[in-house]
Image (spheres, rainbow, N blue to C red):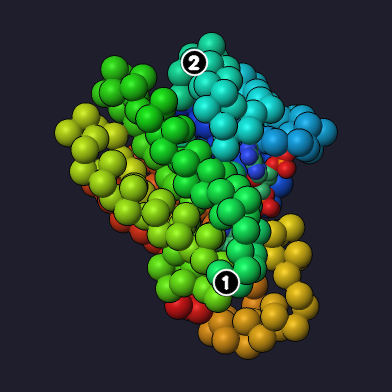
Amino acid sequence: MSASDPVELTGQLAIVTGSSRGIGRAIALELGRAGAKVVVNYLRNQEAAELLLAELPPGSLAVQADVSTQEGVDRLMAAAEAAGGASLLVNNAGVTRDGLMLRMSDEDWNEVIDTNLTSVFRMCRAAAQPMMQRRKGAIVNLTSISGIAGNPGQCNYSAAKAGIIAFSRSMAKELGRRNIRVNCVAPGFIDTDMTRALPGELVEGVQKMIPLRRLGKSEEVAPIVRFLLGPGAAYITAQTFVVDGGLS
Ligand code: NAP
């Protein structure tokens, strides 16, 4: 059960990148329960995105767009502007292409940086303009504990996620005087398709190191994102919040 106040975000439009599955889907549902209309973004999973729309407030929409490209970002932003303009943005879309650094291809490096980091820069650059005009906006960027502590086999992903933290802090300092807040949420191991792709013995080993002795659920990441976008976080910006069952 979510403790979200059903009027907290009423009348606001929120873009959630990569919200057809996993953590992004849970965030879209949480924001919808708090009254926000949601722009559901996906790469391939049209059916899942459209099913999700049925559970969101009227005025929500689903937009196919590859946020790793400028063209995809332009399409997503144009759809949000046509729907009235977004005052809330969650950059959640992400991929992993794990492998040891010595053997990592340029392709795996670039895909992870483009999808996880460059997309955040481009989305924020595009979304901040209309937010500045309205003198109101809140952004949450999904990073990872890998971006704080590093993780073997994830040099590309860790670099992208660390980049998101530094980028967000810097942007928060640029845009604070325009009443735009920017924060990060750093999950640990959350049970989604991303972690289901990992070898079982690796996940079992990690689980033993987590003080709460289990992986997190997407629904356990979403509430802090909703809080950071809402009025209760009016004086919180340039911060990173870890949701990892105590792992780090
Ligand atoms: P997931 O289950 O793999 O879902 C990824 C989502 O991103 C899907 O909705 C996918 O759309 C979308 N997506 C991927 N590439 C995209 C692109 N180029 N353009 C637009 N959408 C794209 O991932 P998750 O586990 O929920 O992770 C969500 C975020 O949390 C990511 O940033 C991830 O790095 C971060 N995170 C996750 C964990 C974890 O343990 N799961 C831990 C720390 C941080 P389609 O469905 O259309 O493919």
Residue 12 visible somewhere in the drawing: yes
Q: Residues within 10 Å of mark 1 (few under 14, many from 20)?
A: few
Q: Position of residue 58 (x, y in %)?
A: 64, 21
> In the rendered image of this protein, does residue 151 appear above or below residue 58?
below
Residue in the image at 64% along x and 29% along y: 65
Q: Which amino acid, by three-letter code, is at mark 1?
A: Leu
Residue in the image at 41% along x and 68% along y: 148
| Residue bearing the label numbered 1 | 102
Q: Image quadrant for the C terminus?
A: bottom left
Task: Please name whichever residue, 205 or 157, is drawn nearer the observer in this view of the structure.
Answer: 157
> In the rendered image of this protein, does residue 140 appear above or below residue 145?
above
Residue 29 visible somewhere in the drawing: no
Q: Earlier in the sequence, mark 2 or mark 1?
A: 2
Q: Which amino acid, by three-letter code, is at mark 2?
A: Glu
Name the image quarter holding residue 129: top left
Q: Position of residue 21 (x, y in %)?
A: 71, 46
Mark 2 to mark 1: distance in Å?
A: 44 Å
Q: Which mark is residue 43?
A: none
Q: Position of residue 19 (x, y in %)?
A: 64, 41
Q: Residues within 10 Å of mark 2 (few under 14, many from 20)?
A: some
